[in-house]
Image: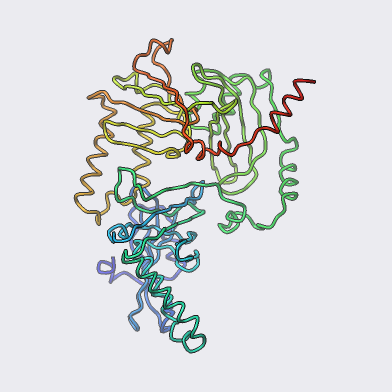
Amino acid sequence: MEASNDAAPILDVRSVVEAISIDDDNSPVYQLESLCMRCHENGTTRLLLTLIPHFRKILLSAFECPHCGERNNEVQFAGEIQPRGSRYRVEFPSGDQKMLNRQIVKSETATIKIPQLDFEIPPEAQRGSLSTVEGILLRASEELQILQEERKKVDPQTAEAIDQFILKLKECAIGNLSFTFILDDPAGNSFVENPFAPSPDPSLSIEFYDRTREQQALLGYVADPTQSAEVVNEALSNNFPSQATIEPHGSVGAVAGRRAIAQGNSAELAEALFRYTAPEEVMTFPSTCGACAVSCETRMFLTKIPYFQEVIVMASTCDACGYRNSELKSGGAIPAKGKKIAVTVKNLVDLSRDVIKSDTASVVIPEIDLELTSGTLGGSVTTVEGLITKISEALERIHGFTFGDSLEESRKSKWQDFRARLTKLLSLEEPWTLIMDDALANSFVAPACDDIKDDHQLIIEEYERSWEQNEELGLNDMDTSAADAAYDSIDAS
């Protein structure tokens, strides 16, 4: 980057900001003078706006001072924050240094934790960076070492404790100690590489979560994070005079109801649902945008899908930031048994089967050794073809460094071979099997004929959930005795 731009003109900050604000896929490297924080002379900062394939746009900045030799670099995200926060957790065993070569994208809002050492790197301690686990730990140890000489003069006991801690941190960095690495980013813009991709990584777990109001405030979306619930409720009531309104079928109708739900959903979701039924009534109620925390409106309706169950469709739109979200939730009681669905895909009709995948369903395609754990891709209403397309896009987006120049040739060829096999499924050269295992039985594959009993390519099997599955779903500790007693008293009266 530096060698090809030595002759680039030195610009002022305003010119650079205006230049990189233009949406240009072929953005050049911009240079500007900036103050060196070590020697207080002027150095040069180079800025490059680029797109990581299948990830997102980032702004790379590199500073170099010709007077004292100081150099540093930083990564900032040029795109929007994600709808949900992300938390990556990696278990590193001792004696395996290669595992520490995982590439890490740490945004400026991410926190890094190592529970075994009671160690935390807050967002302000290390700015956005593109590194490895080893690089992040070594950088942290170097930053702790910087002021050790001064500490030894002022507080020798603390300095000695930090020296011992630095030794443990370096032992972790070279793989001599086992530890847990947690990368928590409320903005959802951080990333931990899976070196076994496209196969599952037994050491890596990913959790996506809704941001709290305090986290929204840290990201700059809420002016006052201490605002009381009463004030929030009062603001909501001002924006929405009635807490919930039900528009009857006579005023909404099937056409208007379809339009109301489709405004907050993709065309694919709306078309798939309305093949079965149009909503008799649409309920609207106030809610809060999951992206910018501004008051918005959520629409909801209940529908019955043949051979399946009643489902609740919820769609939210935000006029402030344009964020849209749709969810499909099961209606009624929690099923007593889990459900495993297997469909053999042989022709175009099979690719067009409607699919409802809940966020508790895992997906397996044995012909290509693909296995997605529950929670991957979230919940969606699509088709068999659409599900395969979503899987392909998600794998490439999550593993943003898959086809980078620094990837080993053997791993790159492995990825390319897997992607080719995944795409080949849609060409139907050979039959293949799609298996969805849902412990809550909230997933569905539509039959290819009127009577599901005549569809011999579709196999549905119910099974008893294990204790571990019930524990993961929170069912083991669920106590409904109070509700049961209340219902019994109502029935008795």
Does residue 31 appear anywhere in the picture?
A: no
Say if residue 280 shows up in the picture: yes
Query: Horizontal placement of 124 versus 203: left or right?
Result: right
Residue sitting nearer the eye, 250 or 345: 345
Seen from the viewer's position, the closer of residues 175 and 357 is 175
**Residue 141 drawn at (x, y percent):** 40, 73
Could you tell me which residue is drawn at 73 percent across and 36 percent down?
243
Q: Going by the picture, which residue comes out furthest to the front?
A: 467
In the picture, the quarter occupied by the C terminus is top right
Identify the residue at horizontal 50%, vertical 16% (top origin). 306
Give residue 133's position: percent from left, percent from top: 36, 61
To which quarter of the image does residue 236 belong? Answer: top right
Q: How is the image coloured?
A: rainbow
As drawn, is 249 to the left or to the right of 2? Answer: right
Location of residue 210 with respect to 182 vertically, above or below: above
Q: Is residue 269 above or below residue 13?
A: above
Image quadrant where one finds the N terminus:
bottom left
Which residue of the protein is positioned furthest toward the right in this rendering?
Answer: 493
Q: Nearer the viewer, residue 356 or 93?
A: 93
Q: Position of residue 369 (x, y in %)?
A: 28, 36
Count of labels in the image = 0
Question: In this image, 208 relative to 45: left or right?
Answer: right
Depicted 225 relative to depicted 42: above or below? above
Above or below, 145 relative to 233: below
**Residue 91 is drawn in which quadrant?**
bottom left
